[in-house]
Image (cartoon, grey):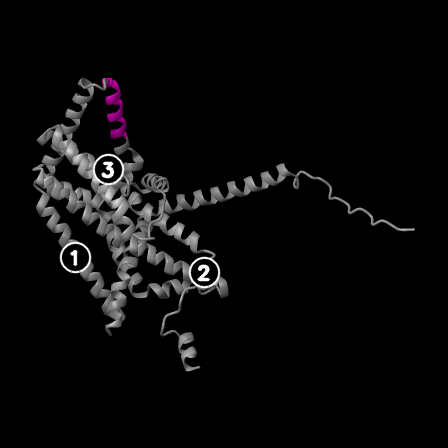
C-alpha cells in the first residue's frame, strides 16, 4: 500500500506575517529613517558655524587638490606646496573681488534705483496693458516676495548672518585652517576614517572618496567657467545695446551662475528691468532674448562639455535641493546644496560598481611595486 507524504503544515497566520503586517513594518522603518535624518539635519543646523566652513573647505579642496599634486610632482615638499596653493588662491580671489568692488562700487545705488523703477514701470504696464491684471494681485505678489526675502529662514542665513561680523570672521578663519589641512593631508584624513574597514567595504570607501573629490572639483571648475562665459556674453550684449550698468549686471550674472536655475533667471530679470527703464521696452525685449539665448547655449552646449558627468541631475532635483538648502542655510545653503546633491547621487551610482571599475591604486603603491618585481 502506497503511503502519501504528509502535507507540509502552513504557519499560523499572524498579524505580523500577513500583507498588512509587512506594510506596517516597512512603514515603521521608513518613519524611523525619516526621524533620524531630521534629527541629524537639525543637529547640523545648530552647529552650522562649523558645518558650513567644513563643507566649503571640502569643495574648495577638491578643486585645488590637482594644483597641490602637480607641485608635489615637481619635487616641492607637501607643506610648501599647500602653502603656495592656498596663498595663491587667496591672492587671486582677493584681487578679483577688489577689482570688482572698485569697478562697480559707485554704481550699486544707481543699479538698485533702476531696478525699483523698472518694477514700477512693469507694474504700470500690467495695470494699463492688454492683460488687465488687478492691482491688488500685483501688491500681493510684491508683498509675498518681500516677506520671503525678510523671512527668518532667508534672512537668518543670508542677511542677518552677513551682519554678524564676529561669526563671519570666525567662519573665514576656520575655513582657511580646515582648507589647509584638507589640501595637505586630505588622503591621510580619509584613510583614517577608512581604517576600521577591510575588503569590499574598504574598496567601496576608497571609491566613494575618489568619486566625491572628482565630482566636487569638476563642479567648481566647470561652474566657474560657465559663469565666466555667461557673464562675458551677457555683459558684451548689454554694452552693445548701450544698457547702463553693464559691468555690475555682468558681475551679478557671474555670481548668480553659482546658483543653478534661479541665479541666471534672477540676473536676467534684473538686466531686463534696468534696460526697460533706461532704453525702453524694445531693448528690454532684446535683453531678454539675449539672456534666454545664452542660457540655452549654456544648458545644451557649454554645460555638457565643461561639466561632463559632474552634475547629472534632473532640473526638478536641483530645484528641490535649492529649496531645501535655502530653507536650512539661506544663500550659502542654496550654493552648497546642488554640489552636495550631485555628490550624493554619484555615490549612489558607484556604491556597487563591478570589480572591473575598482579604484586603481597609485603607481608608487606597495602592491604595484611588488607586481613589478615579479
Q: Is the magenta stretch mostly helix, strand or loop?
A: helix
Determine whether the residue tagged by mark 2 lies in a helix, strand or loop: helix
Task: Determine if the magenta segment contains residue 141.
Answer: yes
Q: How far apart are marks 3 and 2 (CA)?
A: 39 Å
Q: Which of marks 1 and 2 is nearer the N terminus?
A: 1
Residue 212 percent location from the top left of the image? 36, 56
Q: Badge 2 local density, few (<14 within 10 Å), some, or many (20+)?
A: many
Q: In this view, does 105 lie above or below 310?
A: above
Say how many tags the image has.
Answer: 3
Snapshot quadrant of residue 63: bottom left
Q: Give the range drawn in magenta.
A: 133-147
Residue 116 percent location from the top left of the image? 15, 29
- Badge nearest the viewer, 1 or 2: 2
Q: Earlier in the sequence, mark 3 or mark 2?
A: 2
Task: Determine if the magenta segment contains residue 374.
Answer: no
Question: Residue 151: in sight, yes or no?
Answer: yes
| Image position of 323 (left or right of 26) | left
Q: Badge 1 local density, few (<14 within 10 Å), some, or many (20+)?
A: few
Residue 265: numbered disc: 3
Q: Residue at x 30, y 35 (%)?
A: 152
Snapshot quadrant of residue 265: top left
Determine whether the residue tagged by mark 1 lies in a helix, strand or loop: helix
Amino acid at each position: 500500500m502506497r503511503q502519501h507524504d504528509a502535507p507540509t503544515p502552513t504557519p499560523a497566520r499572524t498579524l505580523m506575517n500577513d500583507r498588512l503586517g509587512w506594510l506596517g513594518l516597512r512603514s515603521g522603518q521608513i518613519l524611523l529613517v525619516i526621524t533620524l535624518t531630521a534629527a541629524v539635519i537639525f543637529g547640523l543646523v545648530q552647529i552650522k558655524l562649523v558645518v558650513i566652513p567644513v563643507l566649503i573647505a571640502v569643495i574648495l579642496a577638491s578643486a585645488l587638490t590637482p594644483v597641490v599634486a602637480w607641485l608635489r610632482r615637481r619635487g616641492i615638499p607637501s607643506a610648501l606646496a599647500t602653502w603656495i596653493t592656498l596663498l595663491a588662491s587667496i591672492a587671486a580671489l582677493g584681487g578679483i573681488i577688489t577689482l570688482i568692488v572698485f569697478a562697480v562700487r559707485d554704481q550699486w545705488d544707481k543699479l538698485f534705483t533702476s531696478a525699483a523703477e523698472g518694477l514700477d514701470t512693469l507694474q504700470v504696464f500690467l495695470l494699463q496693458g492688454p492683460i488687465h491684471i488687478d492691482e491688488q494681485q500685483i501688491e500681493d505678489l510684491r508683498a509675498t516676495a518681500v516677506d520671503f526675502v525678510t523671512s527668518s529662514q532667508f534672512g537668518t542665513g543670508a542677511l542677518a548672518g552677513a551682519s554678524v561680523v564676529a561669526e563671519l570672521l570666525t567662519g573665514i578663519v576656520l575655513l582657511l585652517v580646515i582648507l589647509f589641512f584638507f589640501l595637505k593631508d586630505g588622503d591621510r584624513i580619509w584613510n583614517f576614517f577608512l581604517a576600521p574597514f577591510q575588503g569590499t567595504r574598504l574598496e567601496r570607501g576608497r571609491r566613494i572618496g575618489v568619486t566625491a573629490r572628482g565630482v566636487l572639483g569638476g563642479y567648481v571648475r566647470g561652474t566657474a567657467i560657465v559663469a565666466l562665459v555667461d557673464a562675458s556674453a551677457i555683459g558684451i550684449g548689454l554694452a552693445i545695446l548701450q544698457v547702463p550698468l553693464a559691468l555690475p549686471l555682468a558681475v551679478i550674472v557671474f555670481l548668480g551662475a553659482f546658483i543653478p536655475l534661479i541665479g541666471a533667471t534672477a540676473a536676467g530679470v534684473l538686466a531686463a528691468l534696468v534696460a526697460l527703464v533706461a532704453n525702453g521696452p524694445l531693448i528690454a525685449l532684446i535683453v531678454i532674448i539675449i539672456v534666454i539665448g545664452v542660457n540655452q547655449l549654456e544648458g545644451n552646449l557649454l554645460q555638457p562639455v565643461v561639466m561632463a558627468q559632474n552634475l547629472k541631475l534632473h532640473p526638478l532635483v536641483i530645484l528641490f535641493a535649492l529649496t531645501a538648502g535655502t530653507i536650512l542655510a539661506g544663500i550659502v545653503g542654496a550654493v552648497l546644496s546642488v554640489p552636495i546633491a550631485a555628490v550624493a547621487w554619484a555615490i549612489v551610482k558607484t556604491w556597487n560598481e563591478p570589480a572591473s571599475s575598482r579604484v586603481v591604486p597609485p603607481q608608487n603603491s606597495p602592491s604595484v611595486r611588488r607586481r613589478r618585481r615579479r
